[in-house]
Image: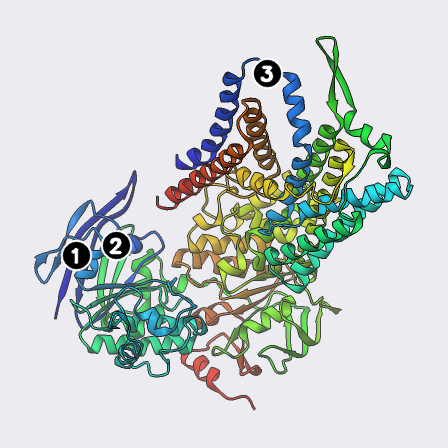
Amino acid sequence: MPQLLISGLSKSYGPSRALTSAALDLRGGEVHALMGENGAGKSTLIRNLAGLEQPDAGTILLDGRPLTLGTPKRAEAAGFRFLHQELHVVPALDVAENMHLSRPYPRRIGLVHWSALHRAATRALHDLGVDHIDSRTMMGDLGPGDQMLVRIAATLLPADPTPWLYVMDEPTAALTGAESARLFDAIARLKGQGAAILYVSHRMDEVMTLADRITILRDGAHVATHSRRETDRDRLIHDMTGRALSDLFPPRPAPSGAASVLRIRNLRTEGIESLDLDLSTGEVLGIAGLSGSGRGALLRALMGALPRQGEITLFDTALPDTPSGAWQSGLAYIPRERRSEGVMPARALSETIALPHLANLSRYGFLRPRATEALVHSLSDAVRLKSTGPGQPVAELSGGNQQKVLFARAMAGKPRLLLLDEPTRGVDVGAKFDIYNLIRTAAAEGTAVIVVSSDLPELIGLSDRIAILNAGRLTRILPAAGLTEAALLSACYERPV
Amino acid sequence: MSALARRYGSLFGMVAIILFFWIALPETFMTARNWINITQQLSMLTVVAVTMTVVMVMGDFDLSVGAMASLSGVVAAVLFTQDWPIPAALGAALSVGLLGGLFNGVLVSLIGILPFVATLATLTIFSGAAFLASDGKTIFGRDIPQAFSDFARGGLPIGSLADKPLLLPSLTILAALVTLAIWIILEHTTYGRRLYAIGGNSEAARLAGVRTRALRLSAFAFTGLGAALAGLMYASRVASANPVQGDGLMLTAIAAVFLGMTITRDGQPHVLATVAGVITLGVMDNGLTQLQVDSYVRQVLVGAIILAAVSFSAFGRRALRGR
């Protein structure tokens, strides 16, 4: 089995030191998780492995021999393969061609040998246990999970040398539960074939089921490498943050004389057949369910972003059925896809924050710049946003801070109902802690909150009640206090009656 | 560093062009009379380009503006021949512009046709309509009322030079007023900021409560109206109207907006940057004409300068990203 030994790796960008003394010990046949907060140095370490950066100091040994990386070609020759969150695929080409993008097509008399191309692709997909994808399907017709499997399968095409190290950076960030399960099967197969997988993730539950060993980085340095069997979440969170897990979720105050905020009767929309739900002031309602259960559709329908039928009242008045009407009546929404549905990446962060509130920040249609500035300032402080100022483009911020921009926007003018779709996806532990506090603070001030999340510990820690959706119907509402992850998960699998 | 180079590189280029002509044409270029002349020559282009900026901030554009300018001039002139009073004829021509713009808006926003295809089709329609209305002829001479053509010749006295009164031309004033109005609308109203938001991320804007369809539709009214106004300014200036006289405005206006985008911080269209683009193009045209450069050579040079500016800007942005 090959072994890669990294020690004392350091890398500075000008005065900022991204890595001070990173270490990693990877062996064939293991899944090795790499964890740490944003800024801990995970990305820099990976960029060094990929040959995109040159380390300032440190040694990398492959099977005891020093290895010089420094270019992507050398990393490939060493048998490394990299799978990023944002996949580079060509949607208009089929699966087999996408698998051959960086390698020669099989040819016959100088022309593409199409049947050989598809045979090779199908064999590689089969080797990965992915028999449900046809090599002639257009890449654009596949979901992100299947696209990722295709990308992995492409590395199983005959190559010299055979790749043995797979670096996966937040691979499940855009995947549904079922897609993730398929990916985990594929990972198990790679591991069985003797490959090493370096798995970078913020998701504790994935790490705890997949990883054999876990390495934690903090502030650019190696903190610890644990065997999964000899550690637990508490230990890992403590190593990453210096804070205990029980501190992560703010206390849940006892419900006080609450008034009804939202009343949903017989809601029907894309993916939801019929749904009744009630919500009171200061309540955090979690929504759990497998993918396809209608979780996200519920929030989009409430916002008026999906056509809907049924009776919905907010404080006894009918809820408008357009996004502009919804914001105006005191709803605030944080969509699932931060980049494509939430922020304006190239524009100043203040513009993203002010956008839904422009009507209140203007007089006779003319903007009041000072009011906007004051609002953006106070909100940025409230969410503890780390930026160079209100003019900084959103794209330059980390994932956690981009999410805080959306929280700042949602908190303006004290929303009456806050709708959150996967509020901590791709966010590091420190920012998560801030976000949980924001949600609880808003609830304490009377805002009703609906949280959709596929992170079950998060739902349990954050919610007062958890509503479980299955195939577009509400199956159960459970009190969150005392609920275990296993009980919640099994409730998600219950069929609606 | 490269952001500065990218942004100020083009600005530096613009200043260099002006300096070049100043040195090459010491007698005539840097004179009040020449600059007044330039601003008057550029007034139509300015109106079209700044109203074009309104749709370009949303990431759209409008190819039909040149044809609309021709059509509006022809409509006014035909109505003059039928003895309509001047304000009524002008009002009718501007209404045609407004309706034509809204029609583009409906095609792009409600029906969902790509702006390129939709406005290419309406370009053809407007152009054909201009030929139909004018019977393919130039309308001139006694058919055009004196008061209408006097407008373009008039202006605001701002002093005298060599015993001749110096006038700030009415067309220049009109173009400045339109620029001011569009600047206020885009930079200082909620309407304008929402258009920028649509350009920044249209789906995010919709989910944040921006009525993207209605706004996108309405923004095309500005390009239609601006084009119609420019067509009338042109007709007044040459005291005649024919069905192709505004056609050249479209490409130059789009070029001016793109040229302007190379000097903005975020690489997005801005009204004042567009005006800088218009002036650059106008100065080159004026200076090269005075240097008696052949007009075909002039076209090649202008195209090359646009390419150079945009390439430089793209290059700077790539350097910025690679950092």
Labels 3 and 1 within one chain: no
Point out which mark residue A6 bears. Answer: 1
- Label located before the other in sequence (1 or 2): 1
- Horizontal side of A1 relative to A129 (left or right) equals left
Few, some or many C-alpha atoms within 10 Å of disc 1 (few <14, some 14-19, many ≥20)? many
From the viewer's side, name the closer residue of A219 and A477: A219
Q: At 9% from the left edge and 63% from the top edge, which residue is drawn?
A: A63
Q: Quadrant of residue A85?
A: bottom left
User: Can I make out residue A361 in this image?
Assistant: no
Q: In this view, does A134 lie above or below A424?
A: below
Secondary structure category for the residue under label 1: strand
Instruction: Identify the amino acid type marked 3.
Output: Thr
Picture quadrant where residue A77 is located: bottom left
* Classed neighbour count for the residue bearing mark 2: other residues with Cα under 10 Å, few (<14), some (14–19), many (≥20): many
Between residues B35 and A132, which one lies in front from this camera angle?
Answer: B35
Residue at image coords 69%, 77%: A309
- In this picture, residue A77 sits left or right of residue B286: left
- Tell me: A346 left or right of A330: left
Query: Could you tell me the amino acid type at mark 2?
Result: Leu
Q: How many numbered marks, from 0 up?
A: 3
Helix, strand or loop for disc 2:
helix
Q: Identify the disc placed on residue B260.
A: none
Query: Which residue bears the numbered disc 2?
Result: A45
Badge 2: chain ID: A
Q: Name the residue under label 3.
A: B28
> What's the distance in space between the residues labelled 1 and 2, CA to CA?
10 Å
Circles 1, 2 touching at the beta carbon (< 8 Å)? yes
Q: Do labels 1 and 2 share a chain?
A: yes
